[in-house]
Image (spheres, coloured by chain):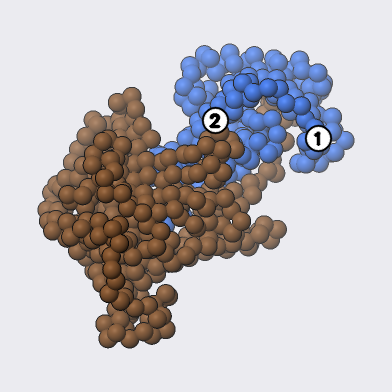
Chain colours: A brown, B blue
Amino acid sequence: MPATDEDVVRDLLHRYTAHVHPPVSIAVGVLARQRCRDRRRKVTSLAAAGAALGTAVGVFAAAGGHQTSATGGPGAAGRRWPAIRLTADQRVLYRLSSVAARQPQGQGRYAVMSTEGDDVKDTSVIDSLTGNMWSFQQGSDGSPSGKSFSAGYSPTSAQFAAMPTGLAALRVALIAQWDSQHKSAFAPLRSRASGTGAIPVPRPVTVSDDDKVFQQASDMLWNPLVSPALRAALYKVLAAVPGVEVNPSATDGTGRLATEISRVDSSGFPGGKSDGITYATYDNPATGAVLESTITYPPGSDIVTPQDPRGTSTVVDTTVYLGISWASSVPADPYGG
Amino acid sequence: MDRRQTRAFEEFAAESGAELLRIAILLTPDWHTAEDVYQETLQRLAARWSKVANPKAFCRRVMHNIVVDQTRARARRPHELRLFDSGERIDPCSADPQHAVEVWPSLRAALDSLTVQQRTVLVLRYLDDRSEAEVAALLGISVGTVKSTTSRAIARLRHFPGLAAVFTTTDIML
């Protein structure tokens, strides 16, 4: 029995909301959209890398004898790589590949990477032996805004170095990685959704193999742990993906000369509105390192803001890579936090 | 967001989703808007998941900011007339539909008459059971402001037509 006005208010608020439960589909949709937004920043999980490597080894063994076997893995059947006349865009990417291949591997256990995006400066420290990552942030007002630690965030240098660098095997490995990640991300959600009975099980994302290859390859390029050989192979794989556009005389957001590599992605939920998102990286033509990555959501995409709840404007999500250095120990918080 | 983070986010959404949606329902004018606010809050949390130390506090602050933004946006737009019934005359949670018909619209209207800050303070204090100091920290205001805002909000509810009787009876039948 409520005794005071405060008790009455408490009782009213609790009673009216006591049995409210959010639809599972909301969290499912959030995660699906987040996956699209994260593609530039996300690296492959350790389990996915292992699965992909396993698949790649099998395919590589088959491809090594110039056999086209249906058991070589998804997408491998019948695929050959004939000699081709390179287009202008492909020649730019092949030059980028040559430049990347000549870069020295970073010396030191820890890669220290400075980025900027959403008015937040970020310094990430990635352990090349364990994949652990420390992240320090500085807010737009110049004060430290947070730090975090993620165990096993990135594949290790050794795991990247173990990935195939042959184009056919690498393409198949990237597709297998995508499939593995997608399966592991959606399995618990589908399981939970099906357990509730009334809520429909989320349908899978529809993505072409070319979408998968571009997403995975461009996901890796920013990572400083990627070996020069793998980086070089990734540029060549990108050169073979239909729909890739290359602008060799672009500049990034800070005015640095860059090679822009972009592609309009066609993936999305069946019937969803996420088609037409453009992913782009701006790469240093002298080193092959990523200077900036952007995701451009066209009008009508699922990305909305409080100011634009209908999503009628173009939204550009940008990450600028300011610099990479190497250290033998985890440095102190550069922002004094 | 890697697989481990996805799983942690999913667990957070499963554990705290109902709490968050309850808060959203009481902060917004209708259920549809509440679901939109809830979804936008989760979206912003997902975008910064690896950087957020306290997801619950982050969500409450973000939810408040979204509601403030929406309120300002609505104020700038021409007034809209509802062409159809919102279907919220009856509280779906109530065990007594008759009383629900009487009290729920009044409570909804009473909450709509409050400022966003008053509404947020009430919800955080009495639905979320946060202390005055916690509410002050979450909203970036002083404890004294929390106290005075709470007092004024309760006074407004107490004298709102349709709710006055609730505050004077010794038992609430919803």
Coordinates of residue B99 in the picture (x, y in percent): 85, 33
Q: Quadrant of residue A323?
A: top left
Q: CA distance from mark 1 to mark 2?
A: 25 Å
The secondary structure type at the circle numbered 2 is loop
As drawn, A268 above or below A48: above
Q: Please give the label number shown on residue A307.
A: 2
For the residue pair A197 and A71, the one nearer the viewer reads as A71
Name the residue carrying label 1: B84
| Residue A57 seen in this snapshot | no
Q: Say if labels 1 and 2 share a chain.
A: no
Chain bearing tag 1 is B
As drawn, A38 above or below B94: below
Q: Residues within 10 Å of mark 1 (few under 14, many from 20)?
A: few
Coordinates of residue A5 in the picture (x, y in percent): 70, 20
Q: Please give the label number shown on residue A278.
A: none
Relative side of A252 to B43, left or right: left
Coordinates of residue B81 in the picture (x, y in percent): 76, 27
Q: Residues within 10 Å of mark 2 (few under 14, many from 20)?
A: few
